[in-house]
Image (cartoon, rainbow, N blue to C red):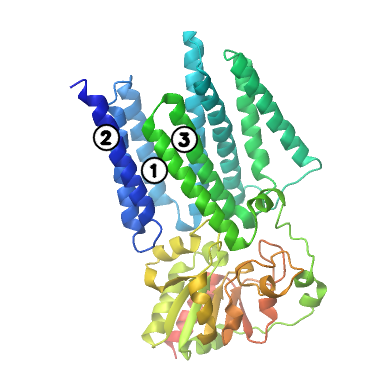
Amino acid sequence: MSDFLPTGIQLTYLVAASLFILGLKKLGSPATARNGNVIAAVGMLLAIVATLLDQHVLNYEMILLGLAIGSAIGAIAAYKVQMTEMPQMVGLLNGLGGAASALVAVAEFWRLLDAGAAVPLDVNISMLLDVLIGGVTFTGSFLAFAKLQGLISGSPITFPFQQPFNLLLLGAYIVGSAYLIITPDSLPIFLAVVAVSLVLGIMFVIPIGGGDMPVVISLLNSLSGVAASAAGFVVMNNMLIIAGALVGASGLILTEIMCKAMNRSLFSVLFSAFGTGSTSGGATSGAATDQTVRSIDPEEGAMMLGYARSVVIVPGYGMAVAQAQHSVRELADQLERMGVDVKYAIHPVAGRMPGHMNVLLAEANVAYTQLYDMDDINPQFEQADVALVIGANDVVNPAARSDVNSPIYGMPILEVDRAKQTIVIKRGMSTGFAGVDNELFYKDKTTMLFGSAKDMVSKLVSEVKQL
C-alpha cells in the first residue's frame, strides 16, 4: 500500500491535469462553457483529494478547517455578489491566488531558516520568483479591485520620474535576490524583497486607466497562475506546477486577444497611461462638439424598433452599471414576438473584464446562439434596420476607422454606423474610457435616447407592447 500511494497520487494528478485541459477547451465556447467549468471543478476536486492523501500532509485538522472556511466564503460570495460586480470579484480572486503562492514561498523560507538546512539553488530561485510574481499579483489585483469598485479614481495615476522609480525598485529586488542566493539565511533581506514586491504591484497598476482594465485583469490572472507554478517548484508538487502553468498560459493568450481587440501593444497598455480624458486629434477637437445631435423619446424609439425587420443590440458598460440586462432580454423577447429578428453584438473589450457582456446576458438567460462576436456581426450591420447601442462608447466610435489623429485609430470596432438607423442609449454626451468624443453621436442616422439604460429600456418595452 505504501508503494502504491505515491504512484496513485501522481496518476490522479495526471487525470486531474487532463480534466483541466479539457475544461479550458470547453470554456472557449458559450455553448460548452458550463460543462467545461464542471469538468475543471471535478479535476480540482481530484487534485485536492490526492494531495490530502499525500504522506507529506502533517495537520489534517488545519487543512479541513481552511477548506470549510474557504468553502463557506465562496458559497456566500456566489450568492451575494452581483454579476455586474464580477470584474471586482475576479480581481480579488487573482490577488488572493498571488498572495497564497507568495505565502508558500515565505513559509518555506521560514521553515528552512528555522531548521538551519541548506537551501538548494533551484529552490532558492523558485522562492524568489514566487515572492516577486505573487507579491505583484496580490497588491496589483487589490488595487485593480479598488479602481473597479470606485474606492479610488479609475484614471491613470502618474508622477514625475515614475518609470525610473519603478526600475529602481526592480533593481533593488534583483540585488536583494542576488544577495539571498549567496547568503540564503538573511531574514532582513528576505523581508525587504517581499516588501519591494508588494510595492511593485502597486506601481504596476496605478498608471493604468479604467479602459484598460480588461487587459490588466487578464494579465494578473496569468501572473497568478505563474506564481502558483513557481510555488509548485518550491514545494515540489507536480499538480501545482501544471495547474499554474495552464492558468498562466490561458491568461496570457486572453491578454493577447484583448490587446488585439484594442489594436494596442501590451507595452502601450502598461506604460502609456491611456484614458486620461485629454482631448487631442480630430475626434476630440472642438469641431466635433460643435455638431448637433438628434434626440428622441422612448415612444419614437419603440416605433423604430417595433417596425424594423432586424435589430442588433450592442451592450456596453452602461448596461452593466444600470443592471439592465434583464430589461434588455425582455425587450428582445417582445420584439421577437412581433416578428423582429434580434441579434446581440459583443465586442471583446466591452465592459470591465473579458467576457463581461457574455456573463451579464447569460445571467438574463439570453440564448448563446443570439450572441455574435465582432468579426461575425460586422458584415451584417448593413442589413440591420436598427442598431440599438446600450451604454457602449469607444467600441462603436467610427473615429477608430476614419480619424488617423484619434488615439483609438486602428482599434477594431462594432460598425453600428453602417446600420440603416442607430439608437444610442446614454446618460449624456460624456466620453468613454479612452477620453475621446464619439463621432457616432453626430451621424445623420443616429438618434440619442438620453437616460439610464435600465430606465430607458424598460420604457421601450412598455411602448413596444402598445404598438
**Amino acid type assigned to the residue bearing label 3 in the image:** Ala
Decide if residue 91 is on the left or right side of residue 399.
left
CB of mark 3 within 8 Å of CB of mark 1? Answer: no
Q: Residue at x 56, y 61 (%)?
A: 349
Single out the mark in the foreground, 3 or 1.
3
Choose the circle earlier in sequence order: 2 or 1. 2
Decide if residue 374 is on the left or right side of residue 26.
right
Instruction: Return the residue nearer the eye: 432 or 345.
Output: 345
Q: Give the secondary structure at mark 2.
A: helix
Q: Give the secondary structure at mark 3.
A: helix
The relative height of residue 201 versus residue 435 in the rendered view (above or below) is above
Where's residue 360, x and y in %? 45, 62
CB of mark 2 within 8 Å of CB of mark 1? Answer: no
Single out the mark in the foreground, 3 or 2.
2
Residue 74 image label:
1
Q: Quadrant of the N terminus?
A: top left
Q: CA distance from mark 3 to mark 2?
A: 20 Å
Q: Residue at x 34, y 41 (%)?
A: 17
Q: Residue at x 70, y 82 (%)?
A: 293
The relative height of residue 133 versus residue 384 in the rendered view (above or below) is above
Q: Quadrant of residue 163?
A: top right
Instruction: Return the residue nearer the eye: 340 or 354.
Output: 354
**Amino acid type assigned to the residue bearing label 1 in the image:** Gly
Q: CA distance from mark 3 to mark 1?
A: 20 Å
Q: Residue at x 51, y 71 (%)?
A: 375
Choose the circle earlier in sequence order: 3 or 2. 2
Q: Quadrant of residue 443?
A: bottom right
Q: Quadrant of the C terminus?
A: bottom left
**Amino acid type assigned to the residue bearing label 2 in the image:** Leu
Q: Which residue is mark 3?
A: 228
Choose the circle earlier in sequence order: 3 or 1. 1
